[in-house]
Structure formats: structure tokens, C-alpha cells
Amino acid sequence: MTKADIVSEIAKSTGIDKNSVLATVESFMSVIKSTLSSDENVYLRGFGSFVVKTRAQKTARNISKNTTIIIPEHNIPSFKPAKIFLNSVAKK
């Protein structure tokens, strides 16, 4: 399912025009991105949590040049679904 499909489904089920729904979805994603960028987590009860995880520094290999490189510590976004969400998907 794409973002356009999500917007269409929400517009169909609520009766709100697609442009308003698209603006709302874009704003929702923008808020989540900016919140995670400032190292804060987003918790949506019954759905899941968007959290920032820190990856430790590690040594990797560049196979084509046969050299080692160091990948510095960095943050990545992660999603952890809620138990209710996991159970509803597992039952289907």
C-alpha cells in the first residue's frame, strides 16, 4: 500500500476531500520526522512506537579495495509495533 492508497482509503471512509487528507498525512509524517530528528520518541498507543536507536561504532571491510573502514556511532529510526497490533496481524 502506498501513501496515495492510504490517502484514498481515508478520504473514502471519512468523506473528507483527498487534498485535505494528503495535507494531514504529510503533516503527520513531518512531525514524526522532526521529533525523531531531535532525539525524541513518538508513542502511539495501540499502534506502536517510533524510537531513535544508537548504533555503536564498528569496523567494516571494503571488499573491493581489501581495506578496513570504521563506521562511526550513529542514530537510526526504528518502529516497534504495539502488542495489540502484533496480535491482530498474527491472527490473520
Image (cartoon, rainbow, N blue to C red):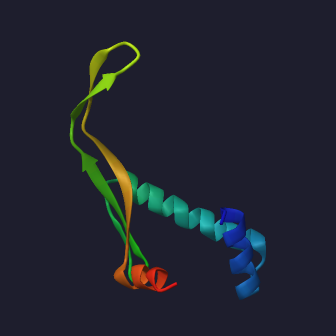
Q: Horizontally, is 87 left or right of 13 in the view? A: left
Query: Along the line of sight, which residue is nearer the eye, 86 or 7?
Result: 86
For the image, the number of numbered tags is: 0
Q: In the image shown, does 33 or 85 lie closer to the viewer?
A: 85
Q: Residue at x 37, y 78 (%)?
A: 82
Query: Furthest-top residue in view?
Result: 65
**Horizontally, is 19 left or right of 92 in the view?**
right
Instruction: Say if residue 46 shows up in the picture.
Output: no
Q: In this orientation, does residue 1 appear?
A: yes
Find residue 73 and report its horizontal and vertical position in percent.
Answer: 24, 38
Residue 74 is situated, as x and y percent measured from the top left of the image, at 29, 41
- The spot of residue 81 in percent (x, y) is 39, 73
Q: Where is 13 relative to 40, above or below? A: below
Compare residues 17 and 59 and report the one nearer the observer: 59
| Residue at 72% over, 64% down | 4
- Say if 34 sits above or below 8 in the image: above
Residue 79 location in percent, x, y? 39, 64
Q: On screen, 16 above or below 1?
A: below
Tell me: residue 84, above or below residue 68: below
User: Who's the residue at 76% across and 82% down the image?
Assistant: 12
The image quadrant where one finds the N terminus is bottom right
Quadrant housing residue 70? top left
Task: State the image quarter where residue 23 is shown.
Answer: bottom right
Residue located 39% across and 85% down the image = 84
